Amino acid sequence: MPFRFVVVLVSFLTLAARMSAEKPFDFTTTPGKLPKEVVPTEYAIRIVPKIDKLTFTGSETVKINVRTPASQLVLNALELEVGSASVDDQPLPKSAIKIDKKQELLTLSLPAELPVGDHIVTLNFSGKINQQGQGLFYAHYQEQETNAKKIVLGTQFEATDARRFFPCWDEPSFRARFQLTAVIPENWFAVSNMPVESGRKINNEKEVRFAPTPPMSSYLNVFVAGELDFIETQSNGVQIRVITTKGKSEWGRYALESSTKILAYYNDYFGVPYPLPKLDQIALPGGFGGAMENWGGITYFESVLLFDPEKSSDDTKQDIFAVLAHEMAHMWFGDLVTMAWWDNLWLNEGFASWMGTKCTAHFNPQWEVWLRNNEPRNPTRRVGIAKEQAMEGDARSTSHPIQQPIANEAEASTAFDDITYQKGQSFIRMLESFLGEDVFRDGIRRYISAHKLSNSTTADLWNSLAEASGKPIGEIAAGWTERPGFPVVKVRRDEGGKVSLRQERFSINQKNAFPFEWKIPLSYHVLGQAPQSRLMSDKTDNLEDIPADRALKLNVDGAGYYRVQYDPRSWDLLVTSLGDLSVEDRVNLACDAWALVQADRAPLSLYLGLIEKLPGLTELAEREQMINAFDYINRLLVGHPDREKFQRYARSILRPTFDALGWDPKPGEPTKATNLRASLIIALGHLNDPGIIAGCRERFQKYVTEPASLPPDLRRAIFSVVGRYADETTWSKLHTLGLKTTSSEEKQNYYDALAHAVDPKLVTKTLQIALTDELPTSRAIFLVGKVARYSDHPDIAWQFAQANMKALLAKADALAINSYAPSLFTFFSEPAHIEELKAYAKANLPASSAKEVAKAVEEIEFRSAFKGRLVPQLRGWIDSRTSKK
Ligand SMILES: [Zn+2]
């Protein structure tokens, strides 16, 4: 197919050009659109929001340093009107001020060449307060306790939206000090990166001036204002606050306590103490959906920051800790040291994901974060282990290297994907386990101290790690960060204790994938012996003196980013020794087996034969691996006559675990049991287990009149099962509960339950909610994706989205625009939808969505082919089970 050919060719050529191209950070040669002759050093910005008009006016004075004489100044501005400008107090004529909307540039033509040295630019401007999380935005919400309708303002600038708030050199390598002043209503409270320096009353309003920041990238600025509350503490000389809308600050207690622990951990790990006088964790009730690492003022959608001890679940607690740990890691990796350009975004995100997971695991070993979905439950993502998610996508032809060329602003926002975050963190984990924790940390400390208050590239990180370890890190890493994909290591037992290893590229649904090879930091152990590691530098390698009768496990604890395929003899030895392997190793075997089936490298019986023998009846991560695979099959079989037969089989595997756990939490039971009980209720409910469905309904009825009767940890699970099989009355009950609550977490649970409904009449009713203001804008648009995923009716969801696309996209942020429509197609498995998507994209989507369209096309192709292979194998396996019994 010509399209695929082009993709392979391009990625190969890019590679050839890039493999040796990465250099240490150098400002002058850093990619970007802005000329490097003029650099800003200090901004003083004053903003006056006009809340009733949803606009603002602003003025700024920027100290610039002219490095070579300049006849014009070029900076970024978007959706701003620039009223006047002057340079060194000389006003420029109107005609000298030009805004190029498409290029997002503001050009000031100068009357005479500006000589080398320091100068002052002054600008007056005005802009819009947006509904979606781009630039300055607003969110309406119902206030806790008073129930009054209120408004809060916030900002979201990454990747390239600071330019919507004030004209600026909006590329990460243009570091400068920023000092913000804002005028707000008198009863409001304002937060920015730094503490308040001074304040004064102006008529009925007040002016708040914040202290200037250290030199930083423009996208890290923050401004939040509204009727806010906070709780605070001091730790190592740093003021830490959790800031919320009025009436919710006590729910910030868990985040405040966790922040204190995490800060101390990072101060030690990085070897450089947190560099700002304060750290604010700011909970926003809407406007944007995730969390953003603004330096000193991190913003969160409130359900990933607030914990109500009476109503919140342990899952929520895990999400909060994980997100805090990720965002706080950015205070060093991202903020103190910032990637030079968006092609190195993974330096921020892969690292923060790894560091956050490591820190979360350190304080909360009971959560098994490396083995479970170690990232917050993102509404549009499949649940599963982060590494597995990355590997699934990375095995496809639409994958890309961790480091990828980013030409412009539109491309910058496409870089925030699974490869950047999850492959990034998985590769770092493999490297750390290869080098050893202490050596790796030593390298990180060198890196932070060498590049603090500056920018860096991946090469800088490898150089620091190479200094610390004495190993050629850049050479080892190149294959993993500058190429797409990853290897499978094939294991074959030969005579005389010799084991031959051979690597191949592991691919799914792609013919003629380019046969890359990797330098693999390989680990292995012979059962009962200490783990070993070695670098597999060639296509083949050998292990010697492996006892013929002992199991050999590669990829110890699954810490490596590669698959392993064993020959039958090695596999049989492993399967008969499962009870002696660690849970980590068993989960890794199950993940690899499932992936080999998906890649058509092994029959389904390899996977099912393994999981039927897994010994840990109530081992959380082990059972969840099966739950995820069964869930995938169950959704693939929507509308297929074999679905019921499969559901019966899957229930027969999972139900004994639930029966062992029971409905009710036992006093003092470990968190793992609680988590597993909830996962099983959802899984079995979706697999149509009559006992589970009846049990959920009964508990929901009781909950309605007596909320305390249902433990918070089970609510999400029970609501989703009740929602799935809801009739009109139950749907309305859930809806009313959702409308009433002021807790974002509870609201989410109820609306998620609505998205599960399978009755087509109710599916349509749920979809309509996406157009209302019942949910914060950032959540409303995901409702459609959830319906596509859970309702068994992706077709109804897509028809609805297509008919209402404009209204839906008006609620989306910069990151969602490219992927929103294509993502709704990933729940289809009929090839007819491929042409439909292509035609839709051609007529309606911007060029920057091409990658997302290709990914969705590939997913449909895969699902269709996989379903074709799976059905007869599944039938054969289940029949053979029944006839044996
Ligand atoms: Zn991040």
Image (cartoon, rainbow, N blue to C red):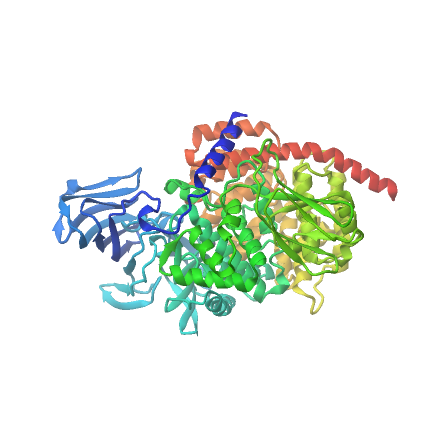
Q: Is residue 637 above or below residue 289?
A: above
In the displayed image of the protein, which residue is found farthest to the top?
A: 2
Please identify the quadrant where the C terminus is shown: top right
Residue 458's spot in the image, x, y percent? 44, 51
- Tell me how many marks there are: 0
Residue 836's spot in the image, x, y percent? 53, 28
Please identify the quadrant where the N terminus is shown: top right
For the residue pair 510 and 537, the one nearer the viewer reads as: 537
Residue for point 70% across, 69% down:
667
Residue for point 22% across, 51% down:
67
Q: Is residue 863 above or below residue 170?
A: above
Residue 550's spot in the image, x, y percent? 78, 54
Residue 514 shown left or right of residue 167 in the figure: right
Q: Report which quarter residue 619 is drawn in.
A: bottom right
- Residue 812 visible, this angle: no
For the residue pair 425 and 717, the one nearer the viewer reads as: 425
Residue 215 shown left or right of residue 794 in the figure: left
Q: Is residue 688 above or below residue 317?
A: above
Residue 139's spot in the image, x, y percent? 40, 53
- Residue 87 visible, this angle: yes
Residue for point 28% across, 68% down:
197
